[in-house]
Amino acid sequence: MSESGDATGKQAEPAADLDDVTVLLVDDDETWAASTAQVLEHQRESFAVETATNLDAASRRFAATDPDCVVSDYRLVDATGLDLLSVVRDRDDERPFILITGRGDESVASDAIGRAVTDYIPKRSLGGRDDLLARRIEAAVESYRTRRALERERETKTALLDVITAATGGTDLPAQVCSQLVEERGYACAWVGHADESGRPLPAGAAGAEAYVDRVVGPAGVPPADEPACRALAGDELVVATVDADADAGERGGESEGWRRAAADCGFERAVAVPVGHEGVRHGVLAVYDADPTVPADRERAAVAEYADAVGYALGAADRKRSLMADRPQSVTVEVADSALPLVALSAVAADARCEVRSAVPRDDGTTLYVATVEGAAPSAVADRAAAVDAIESATVGDDTPVGCEVVVRGRTPEGVLASHGGRFERTVVEDGTATVSVRLPDITAVRTVDEALSAAFTDVTVSRVWTDPTDRETVTSVADLTERQRTVLRHAFDVGYYRRPRETNATELADHLDIARATLTQHLRAAERKLVGGFFGDE
């Protein structure tokens, strides 16, 4: 290792800020230990440094304080730092341990590494005002905490695996999960909710003090917007709320008082709610209520967040299992809140503008043709806005209301990415800076692939809904086996009015839309029509 950075000799970057790092600093030079402890606490507000000057005292302080990191000089008055390392490793094989070597002690480095020391630093490197030791401590503790968090996550998911195996389907799973949270984690109440049409969660399973769930979010009442689970689902973020009904009555009142009063009546002290999702798909929300306020809030947040991740995994697995058993295409809604999208930029023509795409056709030349309507803006404003967006290659804007337009854009588009992964476009709506694309995918396994592809191409992508249509609208394929190209041409022709009387688009214009020859267009249409009519009359 380099004295001032990583193995390449580059200066190490400071680790991310860490909360409450306890360090045990051991050196037989009491003055050096005290001054170094003072410097470390000055360099990092989160550090609390304990000191010891010999092996016996260090062993006692380690047992009493359970520090996040041990820093020890190699030469101690009654032993060596490696003797202390053995004490630490007997307790924890991975606890960060940094060995300080003096002049002439560098030869112990190989022995120290062989005995699983986390890091070592020559003492001469610690002079001056450099924060080398503080940075090394931060890096070691951060790495250790990350590994421990991953281990806890695996343990949680392993425990939930039994629940997944025992549950017969998605309807049983939420209740099983809530029971485990109450019985094994000790929460007073837990419930899992799915969002209704208004976006507020409705219970899918609960355990513990279910009277609260029935009173606040169940059949007995409408879930208030300020209830932690509602806030977590609406804001897509973890929410921690302390129950203080008396303060709430005087300061908040209304619906806030309702849930807090009910929580206080049930003996709750704190509520934690976390959105539940997995691989970009939102499934709902997990809420727990604790009657024990002695558990630190940050530890509570971490535990519930880990559990929510596991619940999301479990619910996703149940959805995939159902979908695979059903063997049907998946209807997917994808939200892309990327201001760089041409249609998002176009819809910014007015604060309340709304753009709805009837047809989106990715073309061979790398452009995408959109046939859309824009509400909430004048035709001239839409035309001016389209001309100002660099990625819009051309735009034909009508003078009707809402404003009809045909827009050709360059570069990658969500519809193009979806089409390249077998997605079948249904509709795109753009408003409030977000493009919401509805698409049909061939199966549930395509959802993850599409999510990864969209996330790589655009910012802020969320697969907000996945479901299997029980009626299976894909009746065309059961009557006539259209190719994907035939389907695209036929769908676009229908969307732009080719089959209306009088026609709103002729064959030449339609061929230009699709960037193909008129003869090729006619061939695709006739082949598709022949298959449709032949399927209707039972001809092969």
Image (cartoon, rainbow, N blue to C red):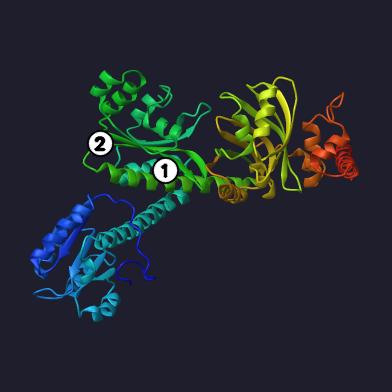
Residue 107, percent across and down?
A: 25, 81
Disc 2 to disc 1: CB gap under 8 Å: no
Residue drawn where x is 41% and y is 21% of the image: 221
Q: Is residue 20 above or below residue 331?
A: below
At a point 60% along the width and 45% down the height, the residue shown is: 323
Q: Amino acid at mark 2?
A: Ala
Dot 1 crowding, Cα within 10 Å, few <14, some 14–19, many 20+: some
Is 133 situated above or below 216? below
**Disc 1 residue type?**
Gln
The kind of secondary structure element at disc 2 is loop
User: Is residue 264 toward the left or the right of residue 179 in the image?
Assistant: left
Residue drawn at 56 percent across, 39 percent down:
338
- Mark 1 highlights which residue? 176
Instruction: Identify the residue at the far front of this view.
Output: 128
Q: Is residue 170 visible?
A: no
Image position of 383 (left or right of 25): right
Q: Residue at x 84, y 44 (%)?
A: 516
Relative image position of residue 16 (x, y in whole percent): 34, 53
Q: Residues within 10 Å of mark 2 (few under 14, many from 20)?
A: some
Q: Which mark is residue 291?
A: 2
The numbered disc on residue 114 is none
